[in-house]
Image: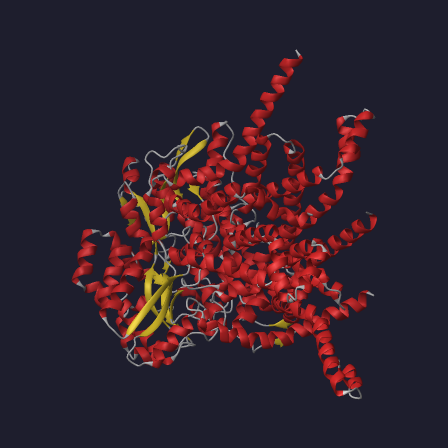
Amino acid sequence: MQPTMGTQQSSLVKEKVTMKKRSLSRWTETVRPYAYIMPALLFFCLFFFFPIGYMIYLSFHDWSLLDLSAMEWVGLANFQEIMLDSDFHLVVINTIIYTFGTVAISLVLSFFLALWLNRQAKIYGIMQAAVFSPHIISLVSVSMLWMWLMDPQYGLLNAILEFFGFPAYTWLADTSSALLSLILVSVWKGVGYNTIVFIAGLQSIPKDIYEAASLDRAGKLRTLAKITLPMLSPTLFFLTIINLISSFQVFDTIYIMTQGGPVNSTNMLVFYIYEQGMDFYNGGIASAASVVLLGLIGVMTFLHFWFAERRVHYR
Amino acid sequence: MKIMGRIALKTGEAVMLIAVSLIFVFPFIWMALTAFKTLPEVYQFPPTLLPESWQIQNIVKAWESGPFPTYLLNSTLVAFGVLFLQILTGVPAAYAFARYKFRGRNLLFALTLIALMIPPQVIFLPIYVEMSNWGLVDTLWSLILPYGASAFGIFLLRQVFMQVPDEVIEAARLDQASEWKIMWRIMAPMAKHVLVTFGLFSFIYHWNDYFWPLIMTNSNEVRTLPIGISMLKASDGGSEWNIAMAGNMILVVPILLIFFFAQRHIIQAFTYQSK
Amino acid sequence: MRKQKLGVFLGTIGLAAVTGITGCASSNQAAPSEPATTDAGASAEVKQSSNAPVQIDFWYSVGGANGEMIEKLVKEYNESQKNIVVKPAYQGNYYENHTKVLSSVTAGNQPDVTMVEIASVGAFADAKVLEDLGSYAAGSEKKYIEGLMGNSYWEDKLYAIPFNRSTPLLYINRDMLKAAGLDPNGPKTWDEMRSFAEKMTKKDGGKTSVFGYSSPIDIWFYEAMVFQSGGEILSDDGKKLMINSEAGKAPLQYWTDMMKEGTMKAPPGEKYNAWDVASQDFLNQQVAMIFTTTGELKNMREKAKFDVGTAFLPANKSYGTPTGGANLVVLKKSPEEEKKAAFDFISWMTDTAQTTRWSAATGYMPVTNDALEAAEMKAVFDKDPNFKVAVDQLQYGKPRPMVPGYKELQEVIMTEIQKVVLGQSTIDDALKQAETKSEKLLKK
């Protein structure tokens, strides 16, 4: 902007004024898009990029929320501590089991549900809505509802099991079943979303491919394996990433249903961070664990964009 | 023979349909049924299906167990406040990304996309510290501001704005309409459908949110409905599941009603990201 | 290429830091204008005019009917005078309340008065968030029962005033004991309790329909049983965990034996969820005897459809119990005026007239010496002697450990003893683990 103003100096007065106006408007035109993005960007910086940087900074310090002025640089000590801590190992293992369990079960179930429910008749539309409905319900309600359903003594689930002559199950009460129970709840909540997305994916597959296949007299299974699955692979990939990311940060169900127990069997990353940071005041440990979580999600995000970009190129 | 087979198949499918819909819908029905039982009936085993007598007052008892009008007001304020800010910041940003060429556009858009993928839950500790430093913890601001801009909203709106024909904008510019006016009077109405879709998504998300108010609030004046409801769980000396379920009805029924009437919109809202 | 991107990324973060400061200023100014959002606005107004009452925040952590009683007492206090208005807020159970208190101190919107579970008083005092109450009390602390003051002092300074105080009790279903031909006053020793439990356990086919005994696998009851076995939790200087010993092993041996015999039920659920389950089982007559707090007495008496009895926790080598419940504390960060008001409120809440009614309405112990002699209290004791059991048991009572590290350590111990009861670990391994983990925590 400065140099343009400079060149105006030698011009005639009248021209100078109009030129000035024009350059001013040119200047506003250049700045305009930035000004439009500015407010949104400000929020992202304040509540996203800056906190990420700050968190990384905090993870190299020994600090507690009690007294932020007493922060001490400790280098990698926090990371060292969690890497050697058997409790943290358990937390990571639990998170991984939970995440992959949830994602695998949910995706397989929803894939078959989608194949089944992807029809025109009205009843299938109603079914899609029914399967989807848990997805829009608050996790508070979902957690409390399932805690009640899974009550080992008075819960509906054990009543049903016993009605059919099965022994009562321990659900949240035992170390061997608590994590599985949480997986079940998150599959119940999330499978509808995946089903709907799969259905959208199925509908975007051009019909003529199937027609060609039926002319070739390809069997149903063969069509599924050779056409449907490959054509759905972008959807499948997208869902895998989205599900992984949301499962990594499970908290509400743990906080309400199990508090990480029994004996840490359902203690997972965000809950661990919450406990360390807010409850035990080990801010350094909490932020180091946050960085680990962020790293996991970062890898997922990177994979997502990498794949999305490739997909665009190949189209 | 073939007809018999088809009938068997149809019946089989009908049974499956009923079974699957029960799995997803019956828990809600059970919530409602429990909400109307007396406490002794709740603790009967095997349980009764229908309440022996319908205890409407359970809902009243849940409602009166805390300042629920305040919770309700706060939930509404937060959900609408967030939505208002997100639209205020989102429409201009999306307009700029869609209709302007400028240096750094791709980079800035990539940053927006990163924000789309990583939820604030992961970085709550530093945000809590920030909020503490600004003295905003335990205010409604601490629930609204961190969600002030939605990457998802910008992403959605940008796609609509890109599809608006150039002629429309050119015509408006010839009419001496300011860019600001074009944005709000022409572009935004054209994106009405997407704005509704996004609005539903954002509203439901923040209406349901538990984690953020749990971290940020500690007085009744600023607590939201999910926090109030979760407190029904803890009562010294035995859980009153009927009251807890009655409380959850307050949280769940409005959303299910909206879902009933705006099903297609909502399903679209929540699955839009996949496209 | 990628490096370049990273540079831009870091640059953006730097930019965010700068905008962060400016953004902060503007949003800070905006905050108080929103009417419903801040208390800060309200208390600022209080200061402006000296006639207006001082407003103080009071956080509590008992729910249900006991919580309602707290609300009722606070309302009475507010109506009894014009200078102070107390605003009560329920914050969930003790653990949740502690988290809230500490994080609110950081944010600067801490309450003026809060309940603190007695074993955590040390951690809070050590973190320098509590006000030394010595000058406020000025000797008036002598009115409280001495046996309840063990968790009030930290480094010889008075930080906490007893409020909802308890000991664990053995609750017994007298009808069931009578039906089984047992002494309706309950068992006196561990061995007796074990045989009582065996006699009252009922099996229907393969399923146990009534368990003789149940107790949450909670640190509090474990502490009690260690004391009964002649042990200590921590060494006198608070530097060493002492439970890797005979006395530390005895409770676990006792519990696992009874679990094996099928006469004991370990109620499922984390922390206070397990307590709720135990109480519910007892009320539903699916368990004949449980350990729980005297604070649930009123609730049990009202809800049970049978004759509820209470007794001392049975003795192993001797009787023994930790005291429990919560004390009231004042937060150091509060303004002077509010601290004074806060102490006035505490004195009122814990004074003889109120503590008597509180005790009668809940089952918690009265906390003043005078209350024990008061006519109203005696009337309650006469009407239902169960209300006196905890007070009598106090002669065997000890304070809970309260070194700062114990706030976290108690959860570590709890996890380890639960491992044993759930069959995930042996007694020796679990206690050794607890000992190892304690070393770091007790150094703090």
Q: Residue at x 21, y 55 (%)?
A: C381
Residue B16, image x, y percentages: 58, 28
Q: Residue at x 45, y 32 (%)?
A: C207
Residue C28, image x, y percentages: 51, 75
Q: Which of the pair C399/C235 is nearer the observer?
A: C399
Residue C304, image x, y percentages: 29, 43
Confirm whether residue C193 shows in the render. Answer: no
For this view, does C365 lie left or right of residue A255?
A: left
**Extreme residue in the front direction:** A14
**Extreme residue in the top direction:** B1
Residue B250, image x, y percentages: 42, 48
Q: Which of the pair B174/A288 is nearer the observer?
A: B174
Confirm whether residue A161 shows in the render. Answer: yes
Q: Quadrant of residue A123?
A: top right
Q: Which of the pair C53/B240 is nearer the observer?
A: C53
Q: Is residue A190 placed above or below C40 in the rendered structure?
A: above
For this view, does B103 lie left or right of residue A147?
A: right
Q: Is residue C76 placed above or below C53 in the rendered structure?
A: above
